[in-house]
Image (cartoon, rainbow, N blue to C red):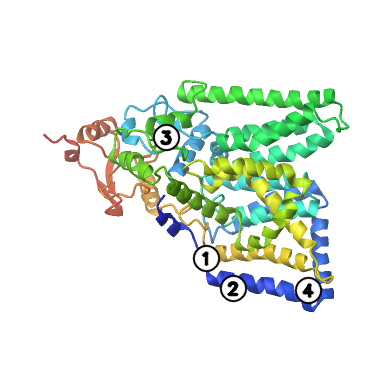
Amino acid sequence: MSSSIDDFLVPYTSSNYLLSAVILATCLLLVVMKPATGGKLFRKIASVFSAAARNKSRTIVGLFFAVVALRVALLPLLPLPLPGIHDEFSHLLLGDTLAHGRLTNPTHPMWRSFETFHENWIPTYASMYPPAQGVALALGQLLGHPWLGVLLSNAAMCAAILWMLQGWLPPKWALLGALLAAVKLSFASYWMNSYWGGAVAAIGGALVLGALPRIKHRARHRDALVLGLGIAILANSRPYEGLLFSSPVAAWLLWWLIKDRASRIPRALRLRHVLMPLLLVLACTVASMAYYNWRVTSHPLLFPYTLNLRTYVTGPIFLWQDARPALHYNNQVFDDFYNGWERKDYQRSWAGARAVSLVKWKRFRLVFFWPATLLLLPMLACLFHDRRVRLLLITLLVSIPGLFIIVWSNPHYAAPLTCVIFALLAQALRHLSKWKISGRPIGAALSIGIALLLVVQVAGELHARKCDELTWACTGDSSRFEILRQLQAQPGKHLILVRYEPDHNIHDEWVFNGAEIDSAKVLWARELNAAQNAALVRYFHDRTIWLVDPDIDNTDLQPYTAAETIPKP
């Protein structure tokens, strides 16, 4: 990748660092200059957390509704997001398809004019993505707007992370970890402020790791079913990352089922209460996925994502791969994107691998961490010697290389690891809080300062109406939607032909549609050659035909004349 990607990353400015230093210094001075007052204050804070976390079920429900209520209250600062990334429109297509009661859609006779990124047209018209995020968007659409599905899934993610942490940490530290996750990912984050996903896969990861300690202690059917549900969600949201994530879990579970002689639960009971329900859920998951693949791609073992890669993608998927031979496409924008930008942005070399790895790390750091977490680095030694979180560390260490060996990787690709990251942060804060110098609770002061700095940072981002530190991740173009609103208010049906100039920005795509083509009030089509345009106009002869050229004026909508569709001699 080119170094220009760094321009899209919001820097943590000197004023931010100054504010962080002031807050931390205040916390430290309190315990140094007034140790009795500081110690009393920190014990009071700990007691408040303990009281709030005492009723585990009530805390989970309360966190869910708190996230929903707070984000709704913030709508004047961050209104309903507009999709802008190619992937978002593809997820919205899937949600719209499911909301119409279908798994896929028939291929349209004029499909070449509607062809766009990350969607399949042959053998059916469908998104290339797994269906889990689409289910959340479909739920939101049925409730009134797809974003409501994002809102509810994000709140459910926070609740699921809290439930998971309650199985690994003491209640007050579980609550702290879940609150940190909520503050970081539920307000000024593209996980909440776009349609790209993240929360659904994070729910899957939390269910998987939250079920394990409960299975170990009680071996109940319901915990095995929750484990299977988590794996099913991972398989239908982030299957590659979910497989990496689940590998250590599978190894531990297999050892516990067969080899663990220290368990007080008889092996026969373990097999009957855990293995059988889990296998049942996994069998249903495999069968459902095969059926979905068959409906979308006409083959039970061919995933829509794989089909799309075969059809369109020429760039490498893994760092050690070379680009495929260039392909022929039905439009120039696809040629520029797949044969141009994707292939040129990474060249197989150590320098290229370092460049894309650095970009991944910067993106992951911005989404999952904040500058004050640097103070937790000395606690890594404690974590590596902490048996309580050993499996979590192994899961992280197994998954991270898999994220870095692929060329393209955005922070929500690591969504299954969300609960692991915040569990380790909470446990590191727990270790830090015990650190004292001359009887003064220095570690407690630092722990409170680290958590407080996250709140201050996010509050500043909300005040600045910043939807995410990755500035390009949740900033859709309002011009397209303003045109859409205008035409939806006019009588009749409309067809908009989109014309691009030779210097068109391939990331500014306007041709996206929903599940319904013929019955849609407004359609967006790609202007191709004159013969295809003429056939398109004839097919939609009952519609008003418009032309828009976003590269010249993205607010100017002109009638599309019949003369423009006549093939040139």
Numbered disc in front, either 4 or 3: 4
**First of labels 3, 1 by sequence position:** 3
- Spatial CA distance of label 4 from label 1 is 33 Å
**First of labels 3, 2 by sequence position:** 2
User: Residue at the location (82% across, 75% down)?
Assistant: 35
- Label pair 4/3, CB-CB below 8 angstroms: no
- Label pair 1/2, CB-CB below 8 angstroms: no
Badge 3 local density, few (<14 within 10 Å), some, or many (20+)?
many
Numbered disc in front, either 4 or 1: 4
Amino acid under disc 4: Val
- Spatial CA distance of label 1 from label 2 is 18 Å
**First of labels 4, 3 by sequence position:** 4
Amino acid under disc 1: Ala
Residue 95 at what x, y percent from top left?
Answer: 51, 37
Numbered disc in front, either 1 or 2: 2
> Can you identify the residue that label 2 sits on?
18
Give the secondary structure at mark 2.
helix
Amino acid under disc 3: Glu
Amino acid under disc 2: Leu
> Can you identify the residue that label 1 sits on?
464
Q: Which quadrant of the view contains residue 28?
A: bottom right
230 left or right of 175 in image: left
